[in-house]
Every structure is written in C-alpha cells, then in structure tokens.
C-alpha cells in the first residue's frame, strides 16, 4: 500500500487531526482497517498536549497498537451493557497508560476518550 496522507486524511478526517506524517506512515502499513483503529486510539491518547510532549509520537503510536490488541482480546458482543467487561477494559487501559508513564492527571480523560473510541469501533469487533 502506498502512503498518501491526503487520501488518508480525507477518508478519516476526525482521527487524523492530531497525527503527523511519520505516525501516519507507521500506521498505514497495517492489514485491512487496523491502521484506522490505531489512528482512532492515537487521536484519543494524543489529545493532551503534555502527553504528546512527554511521550512523543512513537510511544503514543505504540500505546495505540496495544489498545487495538486489548480491544481485540476483551471486547465481546454485549460489552457495552456489561459493567464487569467495561471495568476490565478500563483497568487494562489504565495499566497500559501507567506502563508507558502517561501523565497521571490526564489518565481519566484519556481512558474516557479511548472507551468512546472503542464504542464507536465496537461493531467491527463484536463476535
């Protein structure tokens, strides 16, 4: 697949807002729509300027990849209505953010945004 930032931004404008060209190049070499999922999570975790400054694009891209893995592993058909599954996802997201030293004061907002992205992407993961 050839990298074309203009095409990617046109096809996914809401998630490309905060991503730079290097991050888009990293994410575009993914099968199917995985890069869109990673980019959606990248947008969520990079919405905080201090996180971008502290973490950098490479770490935020790695967090995004791991969030896709968490979603693939933990999301079930009825996850949006089951509090126990949502709690497990919240816990997994928080552990991941702590692992990468995401700013603690910004974690609640990032967790909320990531869960919102998971809800938006849920249709493609429901088994």
Image (tube, rainbow, N blue to C red):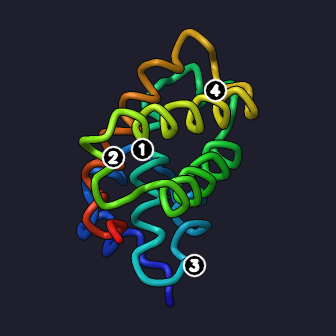
Q: Which mark is residue 53?
A: 4
| Distance CA(mark 1)–CA(mark 2) | 9 Å
Q: Is residue 125 left or right of residue 1?
A: left
Q: Which mark is residue 13?
A: none
Q: Is residue 95 above or below residue 31?
A: above
Give the residue displayed 51% in from the left and 52% down from the top: 20
| Distance CA(mark 2)–CA(mark 3) | 21 Å
Q: Which mark is residue 29?
A: 3
Q: Which mark is residue 117?
A: 2
CB under 8 Å between callouts 1 and 2? Answer: yes
Q: Residues within 10 Å of mark 3 (few under 14, many from 20)?
A: few
Foreground mark, 2 or 3, reads 2
| Distance CA(mark 3)–CA(mark 4) | 25 Å
* Mark 1 residue element: helix
Which is nearer the N-term, disc 1 or disc 2?
1
Q: Is residue 36 above or below residue 28?
A: above
* Mark 2 residue element: helix
* Mark 3 residue element: loop
CB under 8 Å between callouts 2 and 3? Answer: no
Q: Position of residue 1 (x, y in %)?
A: 50, 90
Residue wearing tag 1? 43
Which is nearer the N-term, disc 3 or disc 4?
3
Give the residue displayed 63% in from the left and 18% down from the top: 103
**Residue 73, quarter of picture:** bottom right
Q: Is residue 39 left or right of residue 65?
A: left
Which is nearer the N-term, disc 1 or disc 4?
1
């Amino acid at each position: 697949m050839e990298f074309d930032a203009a095409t990617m931004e046109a096809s996914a404008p809401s998630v490309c807002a905060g991503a730079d060209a290097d991050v888009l190049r990293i994410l575009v070499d993914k099968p199917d729509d995985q890069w869109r999922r990673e980019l959606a999570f990248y947008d969520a975790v990079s919405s905080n300027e201090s996180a971008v400054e502290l973490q950098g694009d490479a770490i935020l891209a790695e967090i995004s990849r791991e969030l896709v893995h968490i979603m693939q592993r933990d999301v079930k058909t009825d996850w949006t209505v089951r509090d126990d599954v949502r709690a497990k996802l919240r816990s997994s997201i928080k552990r991941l953010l702590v692992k990468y030293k995401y700013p603690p004061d910004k974690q609640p907002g990032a967790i909320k945004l990531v869960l919102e992205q998971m809800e938006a992407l849920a249709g493609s993961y429901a088994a």
